[in-house]
Image: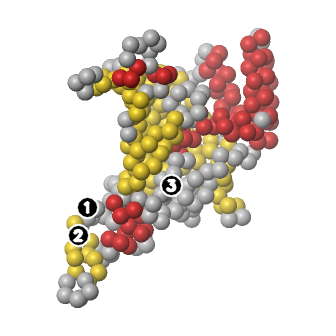
Amino acid sequence: MGIVMSKKEILRRLNTLRINPLGLEPRNYGISIKYYSYDEKVPSKRIDYEATADLNLEYNKGVLTINKKNIFYNQHQPDNISEILADSISKALYPIQTHLNEKGIGTNEITNLEEIKERWKDEKSKLSQKYSSKPLTDLFTSVDHKIDNKTDLEKSLQYDWFWNLFFHSKFIDYGETRKAKTALFLSVIPYQFPIRFSGLQTINKIPTGYHSFVIEFKSEEMPADPYFIPKNHPDPSSYFMSLHVIFDLDLYHHFPMHTRAYFEVFTNDSLGNKTLVKKINYTQFQLNNEDYKHKELSKESPFITGGLVISEPNKWGFYKNIYENDW
């Protein structure tokens, strides 16, 4: 049986997507970031943690609370001093509150700074009872300065992959082809601001079997940042980098579920042969999403499940155009 909805109407709905906050429960995610060099099968570095995103409307304004917890480094709890310090700073920083609009774009403003300051005082006190050294005192001074300077603290959030990918603009105008040129900013170099990746973003109108719709970003190949090129390399121009990101958002609230990002640095020889140099894989999967199993799509949803789509009659009224569900 065909779906009586014009191609124009489906595209209109896809191009005007918004977050639906009604009934949206906090989302829990399991996140893993793996770093590889050359043909490594096992990552040389790995970070795993859990994150929670909780969206509430207050005075018609979206207030988003993001928490991060249970950080593991190379599949173990923080045990060396640098990991312990990083974990303490993270415990002070999170949960963070910020604003989010109906198109999923954040303001990057921290709205609970005083809570963060109080948590940092507690964490600093705990650390001081266990450790004492000049480098630790210098670190405390540096973190104190960062937290006291709201602008600097907000800028530092841009070093985080979760932050970059969660707030990337997904509800853009995809036009009649469901594809649009855009840019994605990702902090692929540690503790540096995100790099701009230009590419093509596509929205898929056919739902997945796990109650989501897919938005996919593929960047153009671009010259690799000098950070990834070995010093004194005879031909830096042979190094390139690319980014591929797959976003899954649920069909009912249009809110992030799963995100997978694949960043690569590689070389091309004169014959066009590609050799992988660096690779970073980011995976973010929503936990406990069994509630979707018995849900049904609203007739107002832009997402359909397949079959034929029948357009309106032509001006003579003799027939309807029938399209395969493939645009």
Q: Nearer the viewer, mark 2 or mark 3?
A: 2
Q: What type is the residue that disc 2 sits on?
A: Tyr
Residues 134 and 69: in front is 134
Q: Nearer the viewer, mark 1 or mark 3?
A: 1
From mark 1 to mark 2, how far is it between C-alphas? 8 Å
In this figure, which residue is indicated by the disc labeled 3? 255
**Percent position of residue 151, x then y:** 73, 39
Q: Which residue is painted at 79% across and 22% down in the image?
A: 141
In this figure, which residue is indicated by the disc labeled 1? 326
Q: What type is the residue that disc 1 sits on?
A: Asp
State if disc 2 and disc 1 touch (CB < 8 Å).
Answer: yes
From mark 1 to mark 3, how far is it between C-alphas? 24 Å
Quadrant containing the C terminus is: bottom left
Residue 323: image tag: 2
State if disc 3 and disc 2 touch (CB < 8 Å).
Answer: no
The secondary element bearing badge 2 is classed as strand
